[in-house]
Amino acid sequence: MIDMKSQRTYSSPLRQQQMDETRHRIVVAALEQIAQHPGEQLSQEQVAARAGIALRTVYRHFPDREDLLDAVWQESDHRLQLTHYPETEEELLHSIGPVFTRMDANATAMRALLNSTAGREMRKRDNERRRSALERALAPATAHLDESGRRTVLGIFLAIFSGRGWEVMRDRAHLRDGEPAQAAEWAVRALLAQLYREQKLSAREDNRRPKPRATARKARAASSGTLTGKGESK
């Protein structure tokens, strides 16, 4: 006797492969659309036409435009290997060179993500995760600063260690392949060194400051033992 339940739950590996290939084809078409038409909002209709598939197929894989944008962002992250943001100072320093080198190697895709309407939407959706990770990485170096100071330093590092920072170095300073990575790493190391110098100076100044004297009342209380519970009247 045929088990109909088993038949219903059977999943064909070939069919799954075809579905994965179609999904990837849609995402690639979306990336191409963003690169060639940066000023336009990305739509399922545009992607279906570029991929040469039915619109209903696009909607089957990506029912919402946000789902499509998330998939495109994940694909671009995969290509650039930016799926993990550094959360420690060591990770930050070790990641600058590889990240900027991959930006150099994928310059067309980077410019599309930076300057297209869809790219701005995708970056905005991921900004908080990136900001929070970098804030944790900078915590040891900014421990001596107040909230305003930490926020200022974070803003500087976000500007340097970013796609926009890479673009400025490439297009305005005319740096060549490999040079943006060197410049960014030098800037980050120099800023970190300065922060730790300031931290040491701040600690020395704190140690040199005279400790506040106890008030006469506290001094008398201490001498009479009232602070320890001794000598209290009953």
Image (spheres, rainbow, N blue to C red):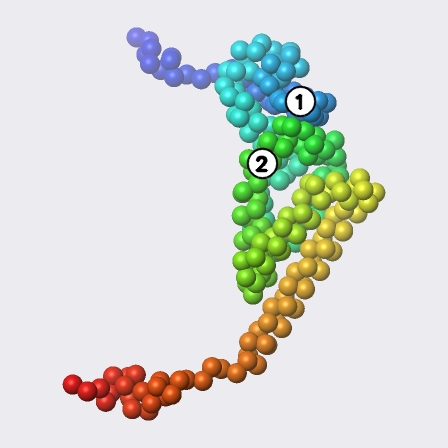
Q: Position of residue 15 (x, y in %)?
A: 51, 15
Q: Quadrant of residue 177?
A: top right
Asked if residue 78 can be seen in this view, the reply is no
Callout 2: few (<14), some (14-19), or many (20+) C-alpha neighbours within 10 Å?
Answer: few
Residue 171 at x, y = what percent?
A: 80, 39
Residue visible at 72% across and 55% down?
Answer: 187
Q: Which residue, given by chain and number where applicable, does mark 2 sit on? A: 124
* 74 or 142, nearer to the observer: 142
Looking at the rendered structure, the secondary structure element under dot 1 is loop
State the residue at coordinates (30%, 83%). 227
Q: CA distance from mark 2 to mark 1?
A: 17 Å
Q: What residue occupies the far front of the structure in this picture?
A: 216
Labelled disc at residue 233 = none
Name the quadrant containing residue 106.
top right
Would you call the spot at circle 1 few (<14 residues within 10 Å), some (14-19), or many (20 or more)?
few
Residue 156, position as x, y percentages in the image: 66, 52
Q: Residue at x 45, y 85 (%)?
A: 213
- Marked residue nearer the N-terminal end (2 or 1): 1
- In the shown orientation, is residue 18 left or right of residue 176? left
Residue at position x 75%, y 34% from top? 107
Instruction: Relative to 210, say whether 145 is above or below.
Output: above
Quadrant of the snapshot with the N terminus = top left
- Badge 2 element: helix
Q: Residue furthest left?
A: 234
Rendered position, 158 above or below 193:
above
Question: 150 or 94: nearer the eye?
Answer: 150
Percent position of residue 123, x then y = 60, 36
Q: Which residue is mark 1?
A: 40
In which quadrant is the C terminus drawn? bottom left
At label 2, the amino acid type is Lys
> Is residue 230 in view from this perspective?
yes
